[in-house]
Amino acid sequence: MDTPFPFEPLLVFGFMAIVLLVGMFLRAKIKFFQKYLIPSCFLGGTIGLILISTGVVDASTDLLESFAYHLFIISFISLGLTVTLRKDNTNDVHSDRNPIKGSLWMAFVSSLTMAMQAVIGTLFVFLFNALGSDLHPTFGFLSPLGFTQGPGQALSVGKVWEGFGFAHAATLGLSFAAFGFAFSFFVGVPLVNWGIRKGYSALAPKSLSKELLTGIVAPESPKESAGTLTTHSGNTDTLAFHAALVGLVYTLTYLLIRGIGVFISESVAQSLWAFFFFFGVVIALLVKYIIVRLGLGYLLDPGVQRRITGWSIDFLIIATIMAIQLVIVWEYIVPIVVISMVSGIATTFVVFYIGRRAWSYSLERTVGIYGITTGTATTGLLLLRIADPEFETPVALELGMQALFASPFVLGYMILMHAPFWWGWSIGLLVLIYAGAMLLSLVLLKVFKMLGPSKF
């Protein structure tokens, strides 16, 4: 039967919503998922992937990739629009309240791990190709994209690379991101629990709350506000206003990239779509600054904006997992597993080696940055919340600010990854540059006196 309007996009969104609800039910009922704090979106995405791969549900991979790409952009724009409220706290445990040093430390650590993951991935590509494989030269760069940058970046860059002849780069990048999440949950959670049992947490809880374990706030429990109204609902709903700001920034970013593309080469212009998130954040910060300078900052509510960010990230993870094409992944399963395992183990060792030498809040900072270097900022906050349930330490703020300090490294690394396509640079040269970046990151940690004696 013909329909008067196209339904497929919203039906795919409806399917993502259904599997999210199923994931919430499983998290609330099954102890194993509670033990490792597996998010409902990850569970739902995995269920959706199984249903699609077995032919039970017919969902367009292109549509899922489109959802994931745009949700990734929305999440970054929303972060840029979020106003940070300062809270005074005189508790002695908060004697180290300056977030700048901690944010810099996290930026240097993420720089180190991203460069290391690129070196590991590329060296293994050399090895596999020497043994008879025919992997694309930039195959190894999917490891840092999936682990440290997360599924959204792995997808967006991979999709651009497909236009340069790297077949199936998007779904391969998502596979690395899935392995990164696995390290976050199945390695990160036991490690933070171990640290708490050993007494290494500044605010070690006796036990995790039922709400955190099940993911559901009980009726009798105190409820946290989702935000406050800044516009009158008789005119424009507050959520609609904040969503409109996201739409404004999105449109301005699109027009900017289109405009820049007119004046540069076609290959570089095509690659700019992989940097949409970066331009989006910059414009979001500029729009927020203008609003505040005009004396209209009271219209921006951080709680409402965070709900938009959280919503987009939940559905982003669902879409990215469901967009993985298992038939293609199976064709490359050996290099994916080997590179992911070595990258994950090396990242675990490096982060915990450096983290235990942080000057204060060693466990909290370690698990927070570990979540970022194997997943996203959301997984970093999830691991941190085990050790710091109420986010009373400055580490949660540092996790948010580290993206600003890490942006020069990330932007530089992203440009280097495109160098073979833009300027024909050899992969061997890039390995040397990334190795030098690893050394530079270590030197910076030492120069800024961020490596001290082991705390645990």
Image: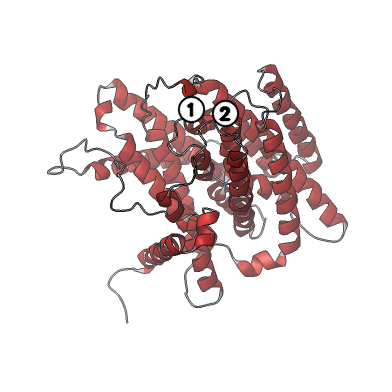
Q: Please name the residue that numbered disc 2 is placed on.
A: 361
Question: Position of 58 compared to 197: left or right?
Answer: left
Amino acid, disc 2: Tyr
Q: Position of residue 260 (x, y in %)?
A: 50, 36
Residue sitting at 76 percent across and 33 percent down?
433
User: Is residue 222 placed above or below 178 in the rendered structure?
Assistant: above
In this rendered view, identify the residue nearer to me: 406 or 87.
Answer: 87
* Mark 1 lies on residue: 394
**Of the numbered discs in the image, which one, if any, rests on residue 352?**
none
User: Which residue type does callout 1 highlight?
Assistant: Pro
- Tag 1, which secondary structure? loop
Q: Earlier in the sequence, mark 2 or mark 1?
A: 2
Q: Quadrant of the N terminus?
A: bottom left
Q: Depth check: give the residue in front, 187 or 175.
A: 187
Q: In this rendering, would 121 be left or right of 355? A: right
Judge the density around disc 2: few (<14), some (14-19), many (≥20) Cα neighbours within 10 Å: many
Say if 60 sits above or below 234 in the image: below
**Residue 27 visible in the picture:** yes
Frontmost of labels 2 and 1 is 2
Q: CA distance from mark 2 to mark 1?
A: 9 Å
- Furthest residue in direction right, as rendered: 131
Discs 2, 1 touching: Cβ within 8 Å: yes
Question: Residue 346: where, in percent of width, then height?
Answer: 74, 43
| Depicted 97 relative to depicted 248: above or below | above
One can see residue 424 in this view: no
At x 49%, y 36%, the residue is 388
Quadrant of the rendering where the C terminus is positioned: top right
Residue at image position (54%, 61%) is 32
The percent coordinates of residue 397 (x first, y second) are 47, 30
Label 2 element class: loop
Q: How many numbered discs?
A: 2
